[in-house]
Image (cartoon, rainbow, N blue to C red):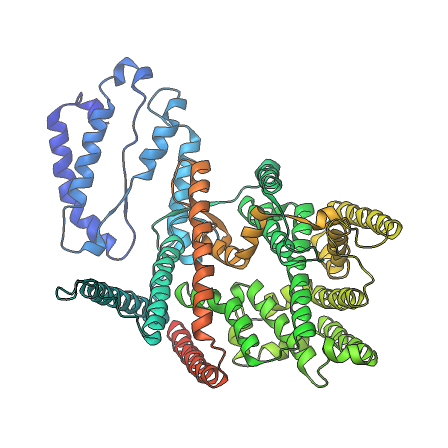
């Protein structure tokens, strides 16, 4: 109106600046106790303006906007009480002004979008929605996060100092003895210095990676966007990775059932499918959800199969083995709980496999310890092991139908600190109950398979079918029918709650069917996909890292590194995400060798140190919770 009434004169702009200057102190006074937004004037579509409005140009509008922003931001009396510029309204108008009927007035959709963003700005800092919504304030650093920051900073400084010292020593040792004319050999570093350097190097890399995690999902540096499921966004990437997996087919080193290459391949393609499931938001489509539940169950099946096979064949129930497994499973999650200020149960899969590992260990380690070597001498030991498995199944059945007993076990302090989420253990109860039988199924399958293998009732030669031709064909036919029957049932699910109730009992059907289809034909057992196997070796790291540096907003949204280019953004974020997961896997393996030594006396000292560390962590966590309340 000012531009129109005064025909765009400079005198009107000068008067406008004077008026803004006079009200700026009043606006700043209001800003001390509330949020004050100055909405920028929207642009116009000059080509269709009427003759009476031709003097209103975007150049003049920009001059008025710049004057307002410059004056309102010029005061330095109280930087926290400045008036905020609602500049997004101008960006929205630039996208919608082309739809204007007269070139001046914007369509209703512009006002709706402005209102939505304004409400997000006001409400989200209070409601703190757990999705990819905008405008949430950055949470303040906790005491534990500050200590972690100091630790990683000191590790980086320490590594740089040691690296500089080693470089200087190397240069000195490289100098040539002028009298003898021989080059001196550099001194070999002592094992302690080498171990310290490896330790600092690992923590240095981990510190940089955790900084990236924090910037992606805690600082307001990168945008997040919500998920919107379409069939194409899920199934097209599935076809892509399937083609890539088939393309990188190689011969296996051994042709046993569920050999190492095959299990890595199995973990790999399942993890890639689960990642696509998460980023596409396919959980809203029930048939896909039910099939993904089988993949999660298959991971737990492998947990039961793998750990049972190790303890049964090796008979190694030592502390070293237990500590190695627990460290490799939990290291990354513990670090993320500290850095990202999240409870342990938030990363539900790791607590799940950790508890099941301890259950498997306890079942087989308690007296009498029954292993393959002992059972070979007397068949009665097989019945003893079956009794142990029946006892385990009974306990699982009892706990699954007694939520009160289950909660009493896991609400005792300090277990409650590990398994509570949002103040209760219901989420943990739900996750455990959903796949309660599949680990037992994995253990039972391993027992039957190893018994058949010992008695040479199966053929595992290269190219040979697992059983006789007739038996193999019958089992293969039954497996294919069972696999398809389960898929048809899962695809016809109408109610998630009812299907989840049946899932623990029937998921093993499709898992066993897949194992038999994959292993009965000798040619199928003799090859594997190196592409999928590579991802399988870092599947745990991929599953955990996706929470913050691929999906972001604690898996509820999608990380946006490059706004405006969704496909390019996914490619870049995926590349970084996979590289980080691989690097963390290497760091975990390196630290496992240092932190968990084979010497029992040294290991005991390390365990005491870890006990002290976690005690301190619990203490700081209690202080932190008290300060929050």
Residue at image point 20% right, 40% down: 69
229 relative to 367, above or below: above
**Placement of the C terminus among the 4 image quadrants:** bottom left
Foreground: 604 or 351?
604
Residue at image point 25% right, 17% down: 54
Most extreme residue toward the right is 470
Q: Quadrant of residue 430?
A: bottom right
Residue at image point 57% right, 54% down: 536
Foreground: 308 or 260?
260
In the rendered image, residue 33, in percent from the top left (x then y), is placed at: 27, 57
Q: Quadrant of residue 104?
A: top left
Residue at image point 30% right, 24% down: 44
| Residue 142 appears anywhere in the view | no
Foreground: 222 or 368?
368
In the rendered image, residue 358, in percent from the top left (x then y), is placed at: 62, 75
288 relative to 311, above or below: above
Q: Is residue 292 left or right of residue 53?
A: right
Q: Is residue 257 left or right of residue 241?
A: right
Foreground: 373 or 585?
373
**Placement of the N terminus among the 4 image quadrants:** top left
Numbered disc total: 0
| Residue 63 appears anywhere in the view | yes
Q: Is residue 331 left or right of residue 163?
A: right
Most extreme residue toward the top is 51
376 relative to 35, above or below: below
In the rendered image, residue 187, in percent from the top left (x then y), is placed at: 27, 70
In the rendered image, residue 450, in percent from the top left (x then y), is placed at: 75, 67
């Amino acid at each position: 109106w000012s531009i129109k009434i005064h025909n765009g004169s400079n005198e009107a702009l000068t008067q406008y600046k004077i008026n803004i200057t006079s009200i700026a102190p009043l606006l700043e006074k209001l800003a001390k106790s509330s949020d004050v937004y100055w909405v920028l004037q929207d642009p116009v579509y000059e080509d269709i303006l009427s003759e009476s409005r031709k003097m209103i140009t975007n150049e003049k509008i920009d001059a008025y906007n710049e004057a307002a922003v410059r004056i309102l931001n010029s005061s330095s009396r109280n930087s926290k009480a400045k008036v905020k510029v609602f500049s997004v309204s101008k960006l929205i108008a630039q996208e919608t002004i082309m739809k204007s009927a007269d070139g001046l007035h914007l369509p209703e959709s512009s006002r709706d979008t402005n209102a939505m963003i304004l409400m997000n700005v006001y409400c989200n800092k209070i409601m703190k929605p757990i999705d990819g919504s905008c405008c949430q304030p950055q949470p303040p650093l906790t005491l534990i996060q500050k200590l972690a920051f100091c630790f990683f900073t000191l590790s980086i400084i320490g590594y740089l100092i040691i690296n500089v010292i080693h470089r200087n020593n190397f240069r000195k040792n490289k100098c040539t003895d002028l009298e003898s004319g021989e080059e001196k050999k550099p001194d070999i570093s002592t094992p302690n210095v080498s171990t310290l350097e490896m330790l600092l190097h690992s923590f240095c890399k981990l510190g940089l990676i955790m900084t990236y995690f924090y910037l992606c999902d805690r600082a307001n540096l990168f945008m997040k966007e919500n998920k919107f499921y379409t069939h194409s966004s899920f199934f097209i990437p599935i076809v892509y990775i399937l083609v890539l997996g088939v393309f990188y087919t190689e011969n296996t080193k051994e042709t046993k059932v569920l050999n190492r290459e095959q299990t890595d391949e199995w973990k790999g393609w399942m993890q890639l499918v689960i990642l696509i499931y998460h980023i596409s938001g396919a959980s809203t489509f029930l048939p896909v959800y039910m099939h993904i539940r089988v993949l999660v169950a298959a991971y737990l099946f492998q947990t039961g199969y793998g750990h049972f096979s190790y303890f049964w064949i090796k008979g190694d129930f030592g502390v070293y083995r237990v500590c190695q497994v627990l460290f490799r499973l939990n290291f990354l999650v513990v670090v993320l709980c500290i850095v990202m200020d999240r409870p342990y149960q938030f990363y539900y899969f790791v607590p799940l496999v950790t508890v099941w590992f301890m259950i498997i260990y306890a079942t087989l380690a308690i007296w009498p310890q029954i292993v393959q070597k002992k059972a070979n001498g007397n068949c009665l030991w097989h019945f003893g092991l079956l009794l142990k498995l029946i006892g385990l199944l009974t306990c699982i059945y009892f706990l699954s139908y007694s939520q009160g007993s289950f909660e009493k076990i896991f609400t005792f302090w300090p277990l409650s600190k590990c398994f509570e989420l949002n103040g209760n253990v219901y989420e943990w109860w739900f996750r455990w109950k959903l796949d309660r039988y599949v680990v037992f199924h994995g253990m039972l399958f391993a027992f039957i398979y190893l018994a058949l293998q010992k008695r040479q009732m199966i053929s595992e030669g290269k190219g040979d079918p697992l059983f006789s031709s007739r038996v193999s064909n019958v089992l293969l036919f039954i497996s294919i029918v069972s696999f398809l029957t389960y898929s048809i049932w899962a695809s016809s699910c109408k109610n998630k709650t009812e299907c989840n109730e049946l899932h623990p009992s029937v998921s093993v059907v499709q898992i066993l069917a897949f194992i038999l289809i994959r292993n009965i034909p000798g040619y199928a057992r003799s090859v594997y996909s190196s592409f999928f196997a590579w991802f399988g070796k870092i599947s745990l790291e991929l599953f955990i890292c996706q929470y913050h540096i691929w999906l972001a907003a604690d898996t509820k949204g999608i990380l946006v590194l490059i706004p405006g280019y969704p496909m390019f953004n996914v490619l870049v974020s995926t590349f970084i995400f996979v590289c980080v997961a691989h690097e963390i896997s290497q760091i975990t393996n390196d630290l496992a060798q240092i932190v968990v030594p084979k010497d029992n006396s040294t290991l005991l000292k390390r365990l005491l140190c870890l006990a002290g560390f976690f005690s301190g962590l619990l203490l700081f966590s209690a202080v932190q919770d008290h300060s929050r309340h």
